[in-house]
């Protein structure tokens, strides 16, 4: 009476626009082109997968891109920002204090005056068009599974998955962040309310926090499966799923699909 676990490798959908970002960005970039915009502007931290993916995707469709980065930019750029710049993204560092204003109309107007008109993609890429894209992650083949597991950052990817999941399926979200605001974010976009839950025990202390136990697990998992996981999102989710399996959380013969949302930045 074994539980079956399979991994949906979204990290392989595109060499540079990794995983869920491919789905989140596709309709936003189409919309930017439809509205005759020449550039997109978005927000992110210095190691943001979203910044990396937006720079690559915008270049591919012929749009200029601007990245408003949380914190001052220094000369020693990390690989994420170096890649974004090489892909043609103009980077602009602002203080953490100003960064908090990123959704305010006044602040966005200032940016328009400074940089000219742009199509806005929110931090993390989550908006209605992103949800629409994420609804395409699951295909009819995936209806064989009883449980669909996704890591959760801003809540956009899982909302699309919840909307697309079949009635017999339960969607489990594994938040990478500590805190309880995510349910409300998901409820804004999810069309169903009873087919999902968040499993909150596997954030390892909060966003970006790792432990030796997690690193050992990631290395062991890679040696066994040759599937690379990142320590911020997918690694914690897979750790959590396997821990739940070992503790008999799932009924016998359950079929579980874990969605590898990428985040490996083109590696």
Image (cartoon, rainbow, N blue to C red):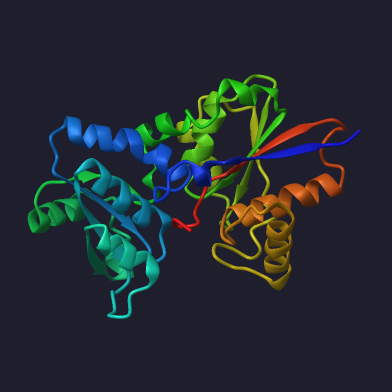
Report whether 113 appears left or right of 78: left
Give the number of callouts.
Answer: 0
Check the image and report above or below for 34 versus 166. Answer: below
Residue shown at the point (24%, 41%) measured from the top left: 61
Q: For residue 114, which quarter of the picture?
A: bottom left
Q: For residue 87, which quarter of the picture?
A: bottom left
Report whether 20 appears left or right of 200: left
Query: Whole-percent x and y of residue 106?
Result: 17, 52
Q: Quadrant of the N terminus?
A: top right
Q: Residue furthest bottom?
A: 75
Query: Whole-percent x and y of residue 94?
Result: 26, 68
Between 227 and 100, the one lying in front of the other is 227
Query: Whole-percent x and y of residue 102?
Result: 28, 55
Between 18 and 199, the one lying in front of the other is 18
Between 145 and 42, the one lying in front of the other is 145
Q: Residue furthest right?
A: 1
Residue shown at the point (18%, 30%) measured from the top left: 34
Query: Whole-percent x and y of residue 265?
Result: 45, 57
Check the image and report above or below for 163 versus 127. Answer: above
């Amino acid at each position: 009476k074994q539980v079956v676990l399979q991994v949906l490798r979204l990290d392989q959908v595109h060499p540079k626009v990794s995983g869920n970002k491919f789905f989140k960005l596709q309709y936003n970039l189409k919309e930017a082109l439809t509205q005759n915009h020449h550039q997109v502007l978005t927000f992110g931290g210095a190691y943001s997968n979203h910044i990396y993916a937006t720079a690559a995707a915008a270049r591919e469709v012929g749009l200029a891109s601007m990245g408003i980065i949380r914190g001052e930019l220094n000369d020693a750029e990390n690989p994420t920002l170096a890649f974004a710049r090489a892909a043609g993204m103009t980077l602009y560092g602002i203080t953490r204090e100003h960064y908090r204003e990123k959704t305010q109309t006044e602040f966005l107007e200032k940016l328009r005056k400074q940089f000219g008109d742009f199509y806005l993609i929110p931090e993390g890429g989550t908006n209605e068009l992103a949800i629409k894209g994420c609804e395409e992650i699951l295909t009819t083949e995936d209806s064989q599974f009883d449980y669909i597991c996704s890591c959760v950052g801003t809540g956009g990817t899982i909302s699309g998955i919840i909307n697309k999941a079949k009635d017999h399926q339960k969607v489990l979200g594994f938040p990478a962040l500590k805190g309880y605001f995510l349910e409300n974010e998901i409820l804004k976009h999810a069309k169903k309310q009873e087919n999902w839950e968040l499993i909150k025990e596997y954030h390892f202390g909060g966003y970006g926090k790792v432990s030796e136990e997690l690193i050992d697990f990631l290395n062991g998992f890679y040696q066994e499966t040759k599937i690379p996981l990142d320590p911020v999102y997918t690694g914690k989710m897979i750790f959590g799923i396997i821990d739940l399996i070992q503790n008999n959380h799932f009924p016998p013969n359950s079929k579980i699909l874990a969605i590898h949302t990428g985040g490996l930045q083109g590696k």
